[in-house]
Image (spheres, rainbow, N blue to C red):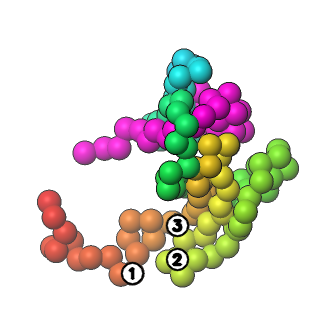
Amino acid sequence: MRLNQVTVTMPDLDAGWNFYCALGLRPIVDARPRYARFVCPDGDSTFSLHQGESGGGGTTVYFECENLDETVGSLSEAGLHFVSGPEDKSWLWREAELFDPGGNRIILYFAGSNRTDPPWRVDKVDRPK
């Protein structure tokens, strides 16, 4: 199984469009004001916005960045406001946090091998197949 996309709800898709374009996602579908879809700059995962009033309902989206500190610096210079980071976390990830215009929590992070292989990883034999 492979993750295709994540979709978040947002009241103002124009504001969301501007935010995610500034974040570096590339638009592939523009059906505003109802829907917009982007492809992530690395890999082939996609990310969508759906128009609705219940944005920010506990959604957190993680985007991995190879050069987290540089990326956060560039995005800050471009006008995006980070509420924290970049900072090292106890779970061995380096993270920076911001919110999109719909109130969805966005984490930019770098984890290296700890992304899928942390020191406390469940042994392969014990994982469901």
Residue drawn at (31%, 44%) of the image? 2
Amino acid type at circle 3 is Ala
Q: Residue at x 49, y 77 (%)?
A: 91
**Circle on res. 111:** 3
Distance from the alpha carbon under mark 3 to that under mark 1: 12 Å
Mark 2: give few (<14), some (14-19) or many (20+) Cα within 10 Å: some
Is residue 45 in view from this perspective?
A: no
Mark 2 vs 1: CB contact within 8 A: yes
Question: What amino acid does circle 2 point to?
Answer: Leu
Near-viewer residue (43 or 4)? 4
Q: Is residue 68 visible?
A: yes
Q: CA distance from mark 3 to mark 2?
A: 7 Å
Q: Which callout, 3 or 1, points at the residue further toward the start of the chain?
A: 3
Location of mark 1 (residue): 119
Q: Secondary structure at mark 2?
A: loop
Q: Is residue 14 above or below residue 64?
A: above
- Above or below: residue 18 compared with residue 104: above
Instruction: Decide whether residue 8 is among the magenta residues.
Output: yes
Q: Which residues are magenta?
A: 1-27
- Residue matched to label 2: 92
Tell me if mark 1 has few (under 14), some (14-19) or many (20+) residues whose alpha carbon lies within 10 angstroms of its own: few
| Residue 19 inside the magenta-drawn segment | yes
| Callout 3 secondary element | loop
Residue 54 in the image: x percent, y percent? 52, 42
